[in-house]
Amino acid sequence: MKKNKNSSKNKISIIVLAVISAAYVVLYFTNGDMFEKSIGKFLGLVLQIAPFLLLVFIIMFFNFWFLKPEMIKKYLGEQSGLKGYIFAILAGIISVGSVYMWYPLLKELRGSGMSDKLIAIFIYNRSIKLHLLPLMILYFGLTFTSALTAATILFSLIIGFVVHKFTLEKTDSLH
Amino acid sequence: MIADKSKFKTVLNKTWKAFQFIIPIILSVLLIVAFVQAVVPVESYHKIFTGNLFLDPLIAAVLGSISLGNPIVSYIIGDGLLQSGVSLVAVTAFIISWVTVGFIQLPAEAFYFGKRFAIVRNTTSFLGAIVIGIIIGGLL
């Protein structure tokens, strides 16, 4: 049953990719310049995230190898308490790559007991990019960077609570 | 040892299956992002802000929400906007919404966590970007 569901989800994602690719084919015939510009940016983005994809694969592998559902429930589950918040914030900050690369892993963790509140906190804290902080300081100064980082952590908790409140009664999906 | 080898194979297979599943989604998002980046030139951002304390961060948050890409790009545009006289309130809302809101990624997020989660999280993050912009931009 689960296998059928996953397989149908996989088919949908391939159909979506096919539709977008078809739109690019149409763009190629209707606006060649725009096509070249878009495809150039696309290739640049692919090259940019390729190393991160490898890292995500490795982290996913170790996640499957070491992480037990009991552990997740302990650190990131509903009963994880303060430790769960700290863990979600730190994990969000140190995680790298595009957010959508983390969705499958977070979904796995959710299946193992991670709450929507902590998922929202994790996703929000991903906006703090450790490796880009020097660049942010360079552009906007240390005071601004410190204030924005502190505000982001604080707001992640607020957003976590709002998401928790609105998803508590009913959790729906596209399927 | 044999058990470890068997576990390695099983876990690798499991990881590969999970990973295979995300590739078409990532490629779809990147194709959309590339198109949006190609269509919306950087200079167009400079013409939109009027100096209004509430309207500017709102516009900035909308632009940041639909402008996906490396955060470095948002820093460069943000710096350019500041140099052009756009307020820090708007620039803060812009750079924070760039990384916290993903309207283009919304279908992918809903796909994994459900529509309700994706809509609530993105809407709250959008409003949060405006509030953070007003607080930080107002204080500094």
Image (tube, coloured by chain):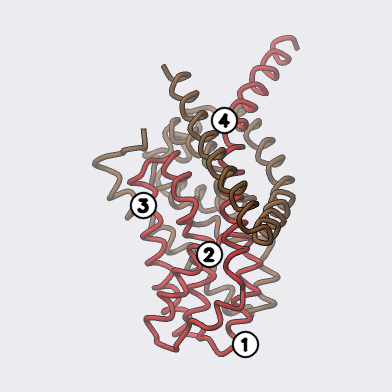
Near mark 1 (Cα within 10 A), the count class, few <14, some 14-19 or many ≥20, is few
* Chain letter behind tag 4: A
Marks 1/3: CA distance? 34 Å
Question: Which mark sits nearer the N-terminus, 2 or 3?
Answer: 2
Residue annotated with mark 3: B119
Q: Which numbered marker is on residue B83?
A: 1
Mark 2 and mark 1 in contact? Answer it, CB < 8 Å.
Answer: no
In the figure, residue B138 lies in which quadrant? bottom left
Viewer-nearest of labels 2 and 4?
2
Colour in which the image shows chain B: red
Colour in which the image shows chain A: brown
Q: Position of residue A115 (x, y in %)?
A: 39, 41
List the single residue furthest toward the front.
Answer: A29
* Chain letter behind tag 1: B
Residue B27 shows in this picture? yes
* Chain letter behind tag 3: B
Disc 4 on helix, strand or loop?
Answer: loop
Residues at discs 2 and 3 both on one chain: yes
Question: Which mark sits nearer the N-terminus, 1 or 3?
Answer: 1
